[in-house]
Amino acid sequence: MRALLFLCFTGVVAGQTTGTIGGKVQDKTGGVMTGVKLTARHVDTGRIRTTTSDETGRFLFAATPVGAYELRAEFNGFRPLVRKGLRLAVGETAELDLVMEVGAVDQEVTVEADASLINTHTAELSYLVSEDAIRELPLNGRNYTDLALLQPGVIAYPHRDGGSVVAHGLGVSINGQDPRSNVYLIDGTPQNDFTNGPAGSAASTVLGVETIREFRVETNAYSAEFGRSSGGQITALSKSGTNSLHGSLYEFHRNDNFDARNFFDSGRKPEFKRNQFGATWTSSRSPTAPASAAASPPTASVLTNSSPRISPRPASTTTSASPTSSSPATPSTTPTSASPPTSPSSHATSCRATSSLPSRTARSSRPEP
């Protein structure tokens, strides 16, 4: 019984932190192809998964880690087909329609295009806050949960007890539900406090944006792997290691010398200074891992060091939107180059330090410039 419960729990966590790649394989005449070998390679880590199409021509890669993928289809008497530019997000089901051509096996057809943006597999209503949005949008306090307010049906809930030992995080109401009806997950682990309040700390914030890859806000009709509460499900995914060594240094500075005088300020502007600084890095090891390691996902470790930040000003978020354009898929024919796949075991570490100087003068209500 204990083993059965453990397996069920493991499956639920995997479903909350991964995505799914599926689709159908056809020939040029529209006939389904059975027994096609499909290989999905994670571009950042080199991890490889394989499967074959069934009697209806369909295939499925379940519980697939998020990131950029390259999909390869092979069948005797047909040119190998390579699909590049596929990016899988947390909780996403990518649907692909592959069309193979008759030809020599020493040539391959390469198509660079992303998957369809329409979800035809599940009925839930959810919204993704991507890695680009987390990195580019300005945030007061660098609290990633503030970006949940950009999604439809999510509003702030300021009328709560913020001075007690609980409920220090950002209170939000999703689809009119009580703020304590939401679930906050990081890599499948609940972050709610013991009263089921929002995730947070004494500084009224949670893990900084430098360690969060992306997160999804599930608002309605989500699957049975989510539960526990009747409100929304905010599922965050931390950054993990890749095959390349990279990192960053950052400094976010706020100073009252850059601010205009508030309408309610009488005389001199109150002093306000804040410095948020830190560093992140990603390292990899074992670049020549054996082929058996291809079934093992990369391991990640996150180290965070954060000191309390005190701000007399209310948090505000400035958003900007820009139209996006999509380009049609462009097939090309290139000679096949075979190279043995490698799947190193990666290790990522992130360190974040924050320093904040509180205001020496009490400020009434000061919006973010």
Image (cartoon, helix red, strand yellow):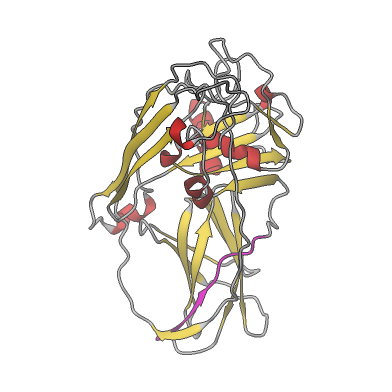
71 or 243: nearer the viewer: 243
Answer left or right for 189 relative to 347. Answer: right
Residue 8 is at least partly visible in this image: no
Q: Is residue 160 magenta?
A: no
Magenta residues, start to end = 106-117
Q: Position of residue 2 (x, y in %)?
A: 49, 25
Residue 258 is situated, as x and y percent measured from the top left of the image, at 46, 37
User: Position of 270 compared to 325: left or right?
Assistant: left
| Residue 51 position in % (x across, y down) | 49, 63
Residue 270 is left or right of residue 154, and the answer is: left
Looking at the picture, how far across and down is residue 279, in whole percent?
Answer: 31, 40
**Residue at coordinates 69% horizontally, 50% vertically from top-left?**
122
Point out the image quarter for the C terminus: top right
Observer-nearest of 295 and 206: 206
- Foreground: 137 or 34? 137
Asked whether residue 344 is in view, the answer is yes
Query: In the image as oriented, which residue stretches furthest toward the bottom?
Result: 103
Q: Is residue 57 above or below residue 13?
A: below
Residue shown at 46%/59% (left/top)?
68
For this orientation, the residue located farthest to the right is 176
Q: In the rendered view, tell whether residue 157 sits above or below residue 119.
A: above
Q: Compared to 343, does 156 lie above or below?
A: above
Work out whether 113 lies above or below 273: below
Magenta stretch holds residue 112: yes
Q: Is residue 178 left or right of residue 361?
A: right
Q: Report the residue at 41% width, 29% height from top.
A: 274
